[in-house]
């Protein structure tokens, strides 16, 4: 029998109902993993601005911004209005026989934000698709004659077959088949990338079609230096290699510039973008290339649809992204991200100075800040062995995750503040509010961190380990 739930029926579901459906029809392991943290044991009623309103009445301050998607805040009223208007007027979404005025207008807007000749856009639906589209464009620009691509060791570019291979982070630890000839260089280390390019020269000609890098890596909260980026640009110019900046996370005002690279005097050949492009209401992504690079790849009519997807530039998604750009501009969200940094960064540095047993590093830009925590838990290992599965305590990565998770758990349970951690060489606590976070929200975060750091670190870790591994909850399920 076919069963479809109505929205009213979905509203009536308990968290157990949702878990059971996930376990039977989605992914059992995901339920087990996510239930290590309270949010996956609760249901959301609605969300607005910086806040998530839970069905149990709790109001959560969202310092994850939907992991990059919600620079505009949850459910921005102007974005909702545009979508409703689009639907009420029965605008046409997609029809390949007609050219789309929405897509054309959006490409024009993107070009108006980008410097120099970066003006040719393609729109798709996920960050990984955007990165793969950018890489394909670079490959085609050399007509397949160049065989190699270089990507950084601490990168995250997505989980499709191509982007999983290009990703350097351990988050993608399984060896999938991928695109051939990926060379790995050390992030922000010019000698490393220079040697890789040099070693692959064939008769003095480069064999690299592209260098792919996040100029600011979001999962490790690590930035390239201006000097490195300038040298990288010069290297690409010298060998005519396409320089691709992956700004899927760092775009759309997150770091106190429209795109992170705009903090520096370096312009890439292709930029990938996603996340807050759709203001948290549409799954739109894309890449923008220089006219020169685009024409080399797809300039001939016969090649013009070599790269395409069904949902390229869907009407309502483009209308949403257009409003998203207008909101960033008119509500001065770039400036807001800078203001958030101006307040939070010195406060976090002061917390580091006062709590060296907790914090070993503070870094980041705009509304993308990270705390690297001290993960030495040797003094309490004996208290954890009864709680934590055998073997995992020896794993350095696990220890880092345990410490940061304990802090995330405490902030959530005691202060209703939602944060997350980045999965990379470091496992930083990431503080990335929406750009609707007020001064009071930021002050509350700092007070809550002060409170957490004044607690006994070992007790916090023990409490979290009991919550996660105590099994009272999981055994009930
Ligand atoms: C820098 C960067 N590139 C690519 C991706 C992949 O995006 P998606 O998960 O939408 O495929 C991400 C996702 O977090 C990202 O941060």
Image (cartoon, grey):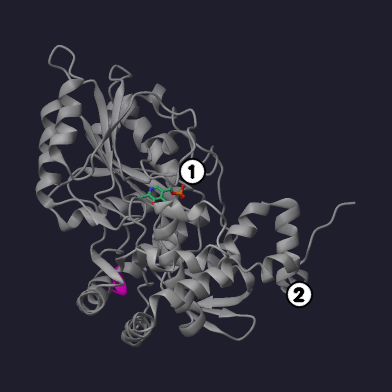
Horizontal and vertical percent position of residue 177: 48, 28
Span of residues in magenta: 329-333
For discs 2 and 1, the disc positioned in front in the rendered view: 2
Front-most of 210 and 398? 398
In the image, taking residue 335 as reference, residue 48 lies left or right, namely: right
- The crowd level at tag 1 (other Cα within 10 Å; few <14, some 14-19, many 20+) is some
Q: Nearer the viewer, residue 101 or 210?
A: 210
Q: Is mark 1 within 8 Å of ligand 1?
A: no
Characterize the local packing of mark 2: few (<14), some (14-19) or many (20 or more) Cα atoms within 10 angstroms. Answer: few
Q: Position of residue 322 (x, y in %)?
A: 40, 60
Instruction: Give yes or no for residue 150 being in the magenta stretch.
Output: no
Q: Is residue 236 something one can see in this rendering?
A: no
Q: Residue at x 42, y 73 (%)?
A: 407
The answer to whether residue 368 is visible is yes
Q: Position of residue 460 (x, y in %)?
A: 45, 76
In this view, which residue lies farthest toward the top? 203
Q: Earlier in the sequence, mark 2 or mark 1?
A: 2
Spatial distance from mark 2 to mark 1, Cα to Cα? 35 Å
Which of the numbered marks, if any, corresponds to residue 12? 2
């Amino acid at each position: 029998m076919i069963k479809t739930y109505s929205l009213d029926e979905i509203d009536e579901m308990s968290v157990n109902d949702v878990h059971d459906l996930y376990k039977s029809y989605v992914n059992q392991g995901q339920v087990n993993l996510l239930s290590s943290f309270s949010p996956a044991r609760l249901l959301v009623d609605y969300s607005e601005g910086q806040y998530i309103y839970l069905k149990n009445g709790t109001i959560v301050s969202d310092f994850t911004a939907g992991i990059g998607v919600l620079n505009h805040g949850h459910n921005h009223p102007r974005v909702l209005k545009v979508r409703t208007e689009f639907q009420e007027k029965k605008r046409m979404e997609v029809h390949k026989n007609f050219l789309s005025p929405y897509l054309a207008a959006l490409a024009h807007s993107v070009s108006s934000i980008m410097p120099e000749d970066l003006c040719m856009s393609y729109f798709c639906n996920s960050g990984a698709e955007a990165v793969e589209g950018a890489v394909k464009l670079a490959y085609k620009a050399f007509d397949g004659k160049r065989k190699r691509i270089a990507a950084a060791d601490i990168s995250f570019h997505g989980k499709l077959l191509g982007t999983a291979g290009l990703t350097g982070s351990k988050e993608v630890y399984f060896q999938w088949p991928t695109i051939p000839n990926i060379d790995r260089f050390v992030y922000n280390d010019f000698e490393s990338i220079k040697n890789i390019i040099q070693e692959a020269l064939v008769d003095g000609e480069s064999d690299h079609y592209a260098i792919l890098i996040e100029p600011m890596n979001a999962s490790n909260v690590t930035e390239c230096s201006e000097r490195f980026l300038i040298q990288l640009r010069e290297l690409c110019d010298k060998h005519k290699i396409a320089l691709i900046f992956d700004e899927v996370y760092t775009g759309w005002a997150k770091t106190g510039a429209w795109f992170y690279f705009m903090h520096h005097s370096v312009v890439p050949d292709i930029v990938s973008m996603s996340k807050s492009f759709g203001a948290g209401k549409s799954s739109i992504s894309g890449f923008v290339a220089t006219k020169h690079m685009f024409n080399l790849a797809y300039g001939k009519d016969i090649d013009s649809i070599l790269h395409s997807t069904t949902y390229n530039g869907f009407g309502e998604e483009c209308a949403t992204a257009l409003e998203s750009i207008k909101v960033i501009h008119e509500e001065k969200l770039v400036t807001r991200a800078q203001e958030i940094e101006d307040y939070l960064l010195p406060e976090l540095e002061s917390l580091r100075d006062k709590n060296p047993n907790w914090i070993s590093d503070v870094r980041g830009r705009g509304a993308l800040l990270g705390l690297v925590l001290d993960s030495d838990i040797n003094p309490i290992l004996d208290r954890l062995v009864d709680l934590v599965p055998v073997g995992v305590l020896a794993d350095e990565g696990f220890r880092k995750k345990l410490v940061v998770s304990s802090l995330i758990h405490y902030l959530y349970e005691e202060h209703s503040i939602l944060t997350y951690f980045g999965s990379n060489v470091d496992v930083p606590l990431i503080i990335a509010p929406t750009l609707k976070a007020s001064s009071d929200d930021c002050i509350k975060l700092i007070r809550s961190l002060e409170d957490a750091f004044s607690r006994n670190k070992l007790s916090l870790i023990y409490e979290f380990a009991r919550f996660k591994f105590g099994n009272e909850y999981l055994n009930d399920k």
